Structure formats: C-alpha cells, structure tokens
Image: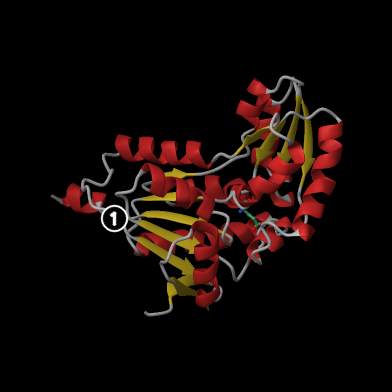
C-alpha cells in the first residue's frame, strides 16, 4: 500500500533555467503517466560560468525542496550541475535515486567516422573533474573540439532560439569545427537541444547531432523499474513547474518551447543562518 502511494509521487527535475525542459519533454513522451515536478533556478541562471561550490550549494537546496515535495527520483537535468554536484548529492542523500547527465562523449567517439567530435557544453562543465575523467576514459582515440558557447544559454533563456543573432553565434562556433572535419556534435548542455534546427541548418544533414534527452528518459525508466517506483496508474501525470525567477515569464517560456499550458509557480531563495533554503512562495 505504502509502495503504491509512493509510486504516485513525482519525479523531481531541475536545471538552472529552461534547459531541463528538453529532458522533461522526453520524460512526458516516454512516461506519460508520471507526475513531474520541475525547478528552474532562473534567479541564478546561467550556472555555466559559476564556481563549482556555489552550484553545489544551489543543487543541495533544490534537492531538499524536491524531497519536501516528495520526489521519488531526482533528475539533475543540467550537465553543469551534474558535473559540479552529482557526487556530492549522492553522498548527502544516499537513499535518493539520482539520474545525472554528462556530455555524450562515449557514444560520439564510438560512432564518428572522421575521428573528429565537437562538444558544446559550458565552461564549468569543461573545467570539471567529471569531464576530465570522461575524456580520459572515452576520447583517447578521437580529436575533440570543445566550445563553451558563451552567451548561448542567455539567448535561449530570452527566447532567441531562432533569431539571426543566435544563428551568427552558432555559425562562429560551428564553422571552424566543420571545416576541420567534425562529423559528430555532442550537445553537452540541456539548453542546446532548443537550437537543433539552427545547428542542423549550419551543419547539413550528414553531421550526427547527439541530444542525450531520450537516453536520459530511458535511464529514468530503468531506475524507477529497479526501485519498483514506476507509476501504477494509466491516468496522465500532472506537471508542476517552479521557477526562482518570474513565474509569468516562465509560463510563457514553457508555452513557447514545449507548447504546454501549465502555469509556472514561484519558489523563493532564503538564507537561514549559514544555510541556503528554497521554498515555495505559497508556504
Ligand atoms: N542547462 C545547463 C547544462 O546542461 C546549464 C546552463 C547554464 O546555466 O549555464 O549545462
């Protein structure tokens, strides 16, 4: 009985902003019966140029928030937060199943024909130990072009997913990679799938673009299965969307990016002594 009730609890998902919605979208597609609870930390976006320990503090507080709202599994739908905080989160919350993200260097290295792979991520992800590990394990045999895509997250947050400014920025990033023979592009930041149409226009049809979101959704399904926590209902799940920024704006972003009509709710940051706490504005 208790297990059954627990299986109706939501999957918690967080990111610095709208990026993790690319993962939420895949989760809705694969697991439509699951309740989803999303936090966009737009008060602090972008994470990608912040120090690792700051991102760890945010991630820990957001995890607390999601657990207060009874999350049964947490998806760190942000490569930067995963690089900075995933190991810590698993240590601090050993009973919680986490699914994190990392740039898909392994599949890219396996499938490239030219031996040249482009990785688009954030500066903080590139600077992390997790990324260095990944490179050492899987990228020995290939040439990897890295680009921190400065300014791209901000453009996507302000809705510029198909404007000339974004197109120019992406051209400046991709042109030298493509000229050097890169045939595989890894999207190592969850914001970037929202500009796949522009990336495709620049790269042409031959280049493989790896968006990890579908694989992450399958991994969530596997972990829920292993923990016997898959929702045991056939009814469609509910989606609750929190932002630490402006709720009205976030509602519009979600509608624009995913065509969803759910309204954004506000979560507020509070300093409690030494502790940083996130709470729902309604409490
Ligand atoms: N969406 C995030 C990622 O996957 C972070 C973007 C940012 O806030 O810089 O890395």
Q: Position of residue 136 (x, y in %)?
A: 70, 28
Image quarter (top left, top right, bottom left or bottom right) of the C terminus: bottom left
Q: Nearer the viewer, residue 150 or 30?
A: 30
Q: Position of residue 107 (x, y in %)?
A: 61, 27
- Residue 50 higher or lower than 246, as above or below: above
Judged from the image, the secondary structure of the residue bearing numbered disc 1 is: loop
Q: Position of residue 25 (x, y in %)?
A: 46, 50
For residue 13, side relative to residue 109 (left or right): left
- Residue 237 higher or lower than 136, as above or below: below
Identify the residue at horizontal 68%, vertical 58% (top origin): 153
Identify the residue at horizontal 71%, vertical 50% (top origin): 122
Answer with the quadrant where ligand 1 appears in the image.
Answer: bottom right
Q: Nearer the viewer, residue 239 or 162?
A: 162
For residue 123, side relative to residue 233 (left or right): right
- Look at the image and tell me whether residue 120 can be seen: no
- Look at the image and tell me whether residue 217 can be seen: yes
Identify the residue at horizontal 48%, vertical 62% (top origin): 39
For residue 218, side relative to residue 49 (left or right): left
């Amino acid at each position: 009985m208790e297990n059954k009730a627990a299986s109706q609890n939501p999957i918690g998902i967080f990111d610095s902003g709208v990026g993790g919605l690319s993962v939420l979208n895949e989760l809705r597609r694969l697991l439509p019966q699951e309740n989803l609870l999303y936090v966009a930390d737009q008060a602090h976006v972008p994470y990608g140029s912040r120090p690792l320990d700051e991102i760890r503090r945010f991630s820990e507080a957001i995890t607390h928030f999601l657990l207060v709202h009874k999350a049964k599994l947490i998806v760190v739908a942000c490569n930067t937060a995963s690089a900075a905080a995933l190991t810590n989160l698993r240590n601090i919350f050993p009973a919680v199943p986490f699914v994190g993200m990392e740039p898909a260097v392994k599949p890219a290295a396996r499938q490239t024909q030219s031996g040249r792979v482009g990785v688009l991520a954030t500066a903080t992800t590139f600077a992390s130990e997790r990324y260095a590990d990944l490179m050492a394990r899987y990228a020995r045999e290939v040439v990897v072009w890295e680009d921190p895509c400065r300014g791209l997250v901000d453009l996507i947050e302000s809705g510029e997913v198909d404007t000339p400014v974004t197109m120019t920025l992406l051209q400046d990033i991709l042109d030298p990679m493509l000229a050097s023979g890169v045939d595989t592009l890894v999207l190592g930041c969850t914001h970037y799938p929202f500009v796949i149409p522009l990336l495709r226009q620049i790269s042409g049809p031959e280049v493989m673009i790896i968006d990890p979101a579908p694989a992450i959704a399958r991994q969530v399904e596997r972990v829920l299965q292993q923990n016997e926590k898959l929702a045991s209902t056939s009814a469609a799940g509910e989606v609750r969307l929190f932002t630490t920024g402006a709720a009205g704006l976030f509602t519009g972003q979600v509608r624009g990016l995913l065509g969803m009509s759910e309204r954004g709710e506000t979560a507020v940051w509070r300093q409690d002594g030494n502790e940083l706490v996130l709470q729902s504005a309604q409490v």
